[in-house]
Image (cartoon, rainbow, N blue to C red):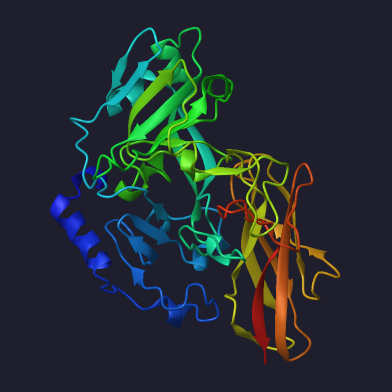
Amino acid sequence: MSHQLSRRRFVLGLGAAGAGHLLSRAVAEAAAPDPLLAGRPLVRYPQKTDLILLTSRPPQLETPMTYFDRAITPNEAFFVRYHLFPIPTRVSLDEWRLRVGGHVDRALELSMEDLKTKFRPVALTAVCQCSGNSRGRFSPRVLGGQWGDGAMGNAEWVGARLRDVLEAAGVRQGAVDVTFNGLDAPALPSVPDFVKSLPVARVMDWPDVLIAYRMNGQPLPMLNGFPARLVVPGWYATYWVKNLSDITVTDQPFEKFWMKPAYRIPDNPCGCVEPGTTPARTVPISRMTTRSFIASPASGSRVGAGAPTTLKGIAFDGEYGIRAVEISDDGGRTWRATDLGADLGRYSFREWSARWTPRQRGPHTIMVRAFNSIGESQGLEPLWNPAGYLRNVVEHIDLEVG
């Protein structure tokens, strides 16, 4: 269906959302307790269900928290984040080719059939999370898209190993970086094209980086990168270039706009500075921090006193996997373990659940924290940096018991 989607239908869908036409209800009605999301419309783009609209040009669509009570995020509910507008709305597989060139022995032009038949397919379950996920919760506020917590998703990706494709091209001695460009292009020459890079040495030693063409058993949705996208598991989605068209090996460091000055964090162990200050040195953002969320019941819900309530959510980190998730109902003074769901791999969401029975009526706050396999967790106080990245504070929901 992805490559059959007509341009007219797609553009009409973009236009409807951009004009502010609601295709369902306002988020304020579904999630009133969250002031950050209150009033933002739920909109429906092609191949998508109701998502929270942040911007329409370029499209930035957030997944409602109700989808994070499970490990796998449905394709139609997966968040969308583009940097440039206009965006590709249709791709013909008969015409599409993935070009591989630069500092290589053999330039390649690969069709989708080439990707599927000339390279061994690999399946990997991994979280894709925007670097700015939860930026809207930073205090003091920072510039950039004011995301809530839903700029993330988890899927099973199938594709060819990037390393295998580069080996087929023959990376030459002296190669430094490999760059990735997609079909989205700037409307004006003054706008920098969205091109990202990874170190060649890192990629050749990292078999989990994929050129993915399937997502949860289906072709990628157009808005999530059809016909192919980069999957860089454990790292933030800025590297997961969508609608991939060009891979270029360079013999010099690649430091154009989207690598420098964009998408950089303070060069220290926490990636943080004192609120309101500027870091002395920065480095490109890379591995994701440890995070956990309560997705059900929704914050602001009413539950019965003395009645067992099932709490559900997900936890994840960059590359080590989640070994424990704990909850607290007394402000973090005491914590108790939750039950973990199936382990789908070190890059995946890990489901968790717990039974909680409130004894007293009135407001209650439930907190959640996760630990990965090397002991990294979440702090009670949020860290800060001027780009609004790396949030991993202990999250909570508020419930009314009555």
Q: Nearer the viewer, residue 85 or 229?
A: 85
- In the displayed structure, would residue 45 be above or below residue 303? above
Which residue is at a point 85% across and 69% down the rendered structure image? 334
Which residue is at a point 45% across and 59% down the rendered structure image? 145
Q: Nearer the viewer, residue 223 or 282?
A: 282
- In the displayed structure, would residue 254 be above or below residue 392? above
The quarter holding residue 79 reads bottom left
Q: Nearer the viewer, residue 255 or 241?
A: 255
User: Residue lying farthest left?
Assistant: 8
User: Residue lying farthest right?
Assistant: 333
- In the displayed structure, would residue 166 be above or below residue 59? above
Q: Can the viewer see residue 50 in this picture? A: yes
Position of the C terminus by quadrant = bottom right
Residue 117 falls left or right of residue 294: left
The quarter holding residue 111 reads top left
Percent position of residue 395, x then y: 67, 65
Percent position of residue 77, x then y: 41, 59
Residue 58 falls left or right of residue 390: left
Percent position of residue 183, x then y: 28, 38
